[in-house]
Image: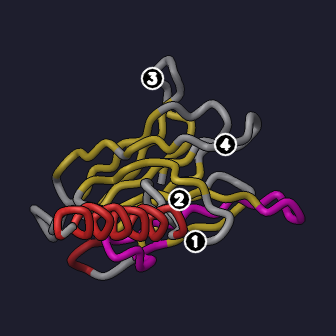
Amino acid sequence: MHRLVKVATALFVSTVVLAGCAATEEEPSAPQGPNGYTNAADLGDGYILWWDRSPESGMSDVIATDPETHIVGSCLSDDPIYCVDGPTDSQVVLVIGPPEAERAVIQWFGEDIELARGDTSEEDAPPVFGAIMPPPADPEAGYHLNVFDGAGEVVFTS
């Protein structure tokens, strides 16, 4: 009799636990960005590039978030543009490129850094790029951005 009570109790507890698991909502497996934004690229160290385009204005909006999903930089335009934004220890460079843009490289205070190209969800969306910048190697050198097409020609520059 004692054994039967143990088995019945174990079955009851298992059923309750499984029912509780089935009733809870599943946690998202991918990072969740601001409402309506598409995860466009991983910028490394937990930073993410997000993209969205307004259906009303047609303007593209790119933002970068830190590992806690706080926005560290943003850029908004319907024309090619670049933005340097964020705190000095994790400045971000964001680019909304011309349609033919394939890659972007910034010479950041004496160091060449390739920006990550984002995947956008619309066929006619402009290419977007971003990167979190390291501390300046040569504070006197400044920065200069070049955006290239598939043939390696500069199609946008700062």
**Location of residue 47 (image quadrant):** bottom left
Q: Nearer the N terminus, badge 4 or badge 3?
A: 4
In front: label 4 or label 3: 4
Residue at the disc numbered 3? 152
Q: Nearer the N terminus, badge 2 or badge 1?
A: 1
In front: label 2 or label 3: 2
Q: Nearer the N terminus, badge 2 or badge 3?
A: 2
Residue at the disc numbered 4? 121
Query: Residue 149: x and y, percent?
Result: 53, 27
The answer for how far apart the CA atoms under marks 2 and 1 are is: 8 Å
Give the label on residue 34, or none.
Answer: 1
Point out the image quarter for the N terminus.
bottom left
Q: Which residues are magenta?
A: 54-73
Q: Nearer the N terminus, badge 3 or badge 1?
A: 1
Q: Which residue is painted at 33% across and 53% down in the image?
A: 43
Taking 27 as reference, is 153 above or below it?
Answer: above
Please state which of residues 52 and 91 is positioned toward the viewer in this rendering: 52
What's under tag 2, amino acid-wise? Trp
What's under tag 4, amino acid-wise? Ser
